[in-house]
């Protein structure tokens, strides 16, 4: 499939819409305020930062308080039912604000909007929502807002195209030292439980030079922590002449004082070369998030994951041999349709064998349009809840042991802000991407410091600054 990149002319057109809005905003006696909230994954957060970039160019300031906002946008997630329910609840709560301030513009965008039934419900049950647009139309946001302001009506645009790549959009980053850089969009894997390929379109990779130039300019502007993003980063590169290990290798060779992270890896595309590049790198975090999803080969097949537990265990052993201080994390789904007690016990077995440093665990949530939503699912919600609690218990035991090995060691930590364990402490992340609380001060924020670890908790380390 050939990937369509948004042309310069299209971007210029959007700039004209931006200018038109900017000129119209003088009706406000002070800068109008925008409230932008992104639900769900880091990809959504970066989309939110682009929307904020466009709003800033239009002349908006920002607020964390919906009741003082002139423009409210919810950038939504559709991965699980509870995320969708939360959005419906939060959108419903805006109705009274619209009554108080009829000039308020409310917009809902993102993955939820790409689901036909959900989009219909938003349109019909929330008449006070002014603009609804899908994930593929992010770059046309100035035009949509213009249509709403000057056309005076509600605007719905839910193209179901396979998506495009838009380079050069303005970005208003939430941090001055941490930045996320999408290297690809969409997903081709169609794991049978997952809605992402339906709402984010086909996989498309950015040109390596675009990624390298963006990362270089972030490093030059003082960014210290750069997170490369994609639904399946290690399949990066289709249609370009560079694969993911090569991209990482080239980025690791950039000059500067920085760290590189990446999310998420799919076990079917995780290669020895990728692990070798991490092991030999100067800047890449010693952290791999490698979602196994389940410990039963039968269920992995039904999930359409294209690896088995033997291959997964091989990768774990190889990675731990090459990167002895590897922080290995995972995602697990409990209660996939057709999963039996024996399958679940195999997941528990795998958890005990691997002893993940940390795991994100989910109960299966049927999603509109996916294959798994059509499968027989005889196990009761109560039973699934019981399995889920058992899984948490097993993970809890592994988690509480896994950080003990760092006690007495000195780790290099990027300080991010105030402490998590106490107000007197400051907090950061080690190269293993582990949370570290320590006796820092305000000047440490955004800088690397060395911390001697004195205590290990199940979810964090605590220590004393040594420099
Ligand atoms: N692309 C990534 C991957 O393949 O690992 C992550 C995609 S998804 C946003 C993050 C996690 O949500 C998945 O790894 C999976 O464990 C979980 N998830 C996705 N769909 C789900 C569903 N229908 N029910 C429960 N959990 C789900
Ligand atoms: Fe969803 Fe699977 Fe794609 Fe991850 S790899 S986004 S779980 S379809």
Image (spheres, helix red, strand yellow):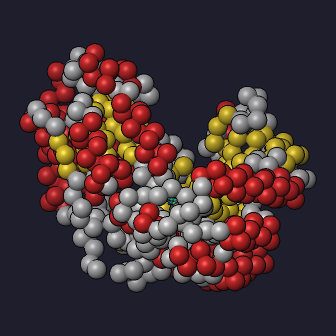
The residue shown at (29%, 41%) is: 122
The residue shown at (73%, 28%) is: 423
Vertical side of 160 occupied by 57: above or below? above
The answer to which of 238 and 415 lies nearer the viewer is: 238
- Name the image quarter holding the C terminus: top right
Residue 266 position in % (x across, y down): 55, 72
The answer to which of 291 and 84 lies nearer the viewer is: 84
Quadrant location of residue 330? bottom right
The residue shown at (21%, 23%) is: 103
Q: Which residue extends farthest left? A: 151
Residue 181 position in % (x across, y down): 46, 59
Quadrant location of residue 399? bottom right
Residue 124 position in % (x across, y down): 23, 39
Direction from residue 120 to residue 143 in the image, left or right: left
The residue shown at (71%, 71%) is: 342
- Name the image quarter holding the N terminus: bottom left
Vertical side of 167 occupied by 2: above or below? below
Direction from residue 410 to residue 293 in the image, left or right: left
Vertical side of 308 occupied by 447: above or below? above
Q: Which residue extends farthest right? A: 408
The answer to which of 122 and 175 lies nearer the viewer is: 122
Q: Is residue 144 visible?
A: yes
Quadrant location of residue 326? bottom right
The image shows a total of numbered marks equal to: 0
Residue 142 position in % (x across, y down): 21, 44
Q: Is residue 19 visible?
A: no
């Amino acid at each position: 499939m050939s990937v369509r990149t948004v042309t310069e002319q299209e971007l210029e057109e959007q700039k004209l819409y931006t200018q038109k809005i900017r000129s119209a905003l003088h009706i406000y006696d002070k800068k109008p305020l925008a409230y932008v909230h992104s639900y769900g994954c880091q990809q959504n957060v970066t989309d939110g930062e682009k929307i904020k970039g466009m709003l800033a160019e239009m002349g908006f300031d920002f607020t964390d308080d919906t009741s003082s906002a002139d423009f409210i946008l919810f950038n939504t997630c559709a991965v699980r039912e509870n995320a969708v329910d939360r959005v419906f609840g939060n959108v419903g709560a805006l109705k009274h604000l619209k009554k108080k301030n009829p000039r308020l513009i409310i917009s809902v965008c993102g993955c939820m909007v790409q689901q036909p039934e959900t989009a219909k419900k938003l349109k019909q049950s929330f008449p006070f929502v002014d603009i609804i647009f899908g994930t593929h139309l992010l770059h046309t946001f100035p035009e949509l807002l213009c249509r709403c302001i000057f056309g005076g009506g509600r605007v719905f645009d839910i193209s179901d195209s396979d998506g495009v790549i838009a380079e050069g959009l303005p970005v208003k980053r939430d941090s001055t030292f941490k930045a996320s850089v999408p290297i690809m969009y969409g997903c081709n894997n169609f794991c049978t439980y997952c809605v992402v390929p339906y709402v984010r379109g086909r996989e498309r990779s950015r040109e390596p030079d675009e990624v390298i130039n963006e990362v270089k300019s972030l490093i030059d502007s003082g960014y210290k922590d750069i997170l490369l993003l994609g639904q399946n980063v290690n399949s990066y590169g289709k249609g370009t002449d560079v694969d993911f290990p090569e991209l990482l290798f080239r980025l690791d060779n950039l000059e500067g004082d920085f760290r590189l992270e990446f999310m998420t890896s799919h076990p079917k595309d995780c290669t020895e070369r990728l692990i070798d590049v991490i092991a030999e790198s100067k800047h890449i975090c010693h952290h791999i998030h490698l979602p196994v999803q389940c410990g039963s080969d039968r269920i992995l097949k039904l999930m359409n994951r294209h690896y088995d537990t033997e291959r997964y265990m091989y990768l774990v052993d190889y990675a731990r041999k090459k990167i002895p201080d590897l922080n290995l994390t995972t995602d697990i789904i409990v209660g996939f349709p057709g999963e039996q007690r024996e399958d679940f016990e195999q997941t528990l077995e795998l958890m005990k064998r691997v002893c993940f440093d940390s795991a994100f665990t989910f109960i299966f949530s049927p999603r509109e349009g996916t294959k798994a939503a059509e499968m027989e699912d005889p196990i009761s919600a109560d039973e699934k809840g019981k399995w889920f609690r058992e899984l948490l218990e097993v993970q809890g035991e592994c988690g509480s042991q896994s950080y003990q090995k760092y006690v007495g060691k000195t780790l290099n930590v990027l300080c991010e802000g105030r402490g998590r364990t106490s107000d007197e402490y400051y907090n950061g992340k080690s190269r293993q991407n582990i949370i570290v609380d320590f006796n820092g001060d305000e000047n440490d924020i955004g800088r690397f410091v060395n911390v001697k670890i004195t205590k290990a908790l199940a979810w964090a380390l605590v220590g004393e600054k040594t420099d």
